[in-house]
Image (cartoon, rainbow, N blue to C red):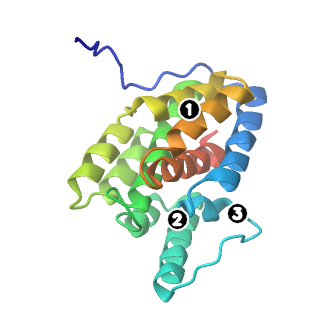
Amino acid sequence: MTHRLDYNSKLRVGPLEAAKLEPNLRVLEKLLLASAPARSLAFLIDECGGRTFASAFEKELARSLSAGVARLAHGDLEGGAARIKGLGYGLTPSGDDFLAGFLLGMHALEMAAGIDLAAERRAIREASRGANQLSEVMLRSAAEGRCFERANSLIQSLFEGAEADVVAHARRLFAVGASSGADLGVGLLFALKVTAWS
């Protein structure tokens, strides 16, 4: 049995159309809140504070992640990335998955809007370096605008697809790992919603 290895990991998105991207981002956000795994970072986008943290460890983890994301959102890219890297559960920790999604979102906006965020991506990449080799490969690839098929398909659907496409591709992404796919989706959502990039 032979397998075709013709997948191209490079992001491919069309021109930025706010009338398409904005409703698709709302669909992704609702889906993350409704169906992301329990230990995912979806709590970062839950303004109602629906998730409760039982242990002191979980509370401190949530506080540290929230503080790092706030720094990213306010333009302290190095400080935010350094605070988030390596935090959380999983073979690739939740914070690293989030940063990979954030980097992919920035790269997609560069392509779609014709803007240059290379220096910003480099700053995040440098600040996110760590000892986890799987995370290193994932973050390097994301900084270069390369990712696995499920993430690539979701990103394309956000920029070019209908709401049903976003739902289908988001669900496929959320099935990756215990929470890795959803955590990448949260990072992607944050990057695409930060108005400074658009």
Hey, what amino acid is under mark 1? Answer: Leu
Q: Residue at x 63, y 49 (%)?
A: 194
Q: Decide if residue 162 is on the left or right side of residue 140.
A: right
The amino acid sitting under disc 2 is Arg
- State which mark lies toward you, 3 or 2: 2
Q: Name which of mark 3 and mark 2 comes first in the sequence.
A: 2
Q: Quickly name the residue at label 2.
A: 39
Query: In the rendered image, is residue 114 in sight?
Result: no
The secondary element bearing badge 1 is classed as: helix
Q: Which residue is mark 1?
A: 154
Quarter of the C terminus within the rendering: top right
The picture places residue 106, in percent across and down from the top left corner, at 51, 40
Q: Based on the displayed image, in which of its 4 quarters is residue 188 positioned?
A: top right
Amino acid of disc 3: Asp
Q: Please, is residue 22 above or below residue 157 in the view?
A: below
Q: Quadrant of residue 27?
A: top right
Residue 160 at x, y = what percent?
A: 65, 21
Which residue in the protein does label 3 denote?
46
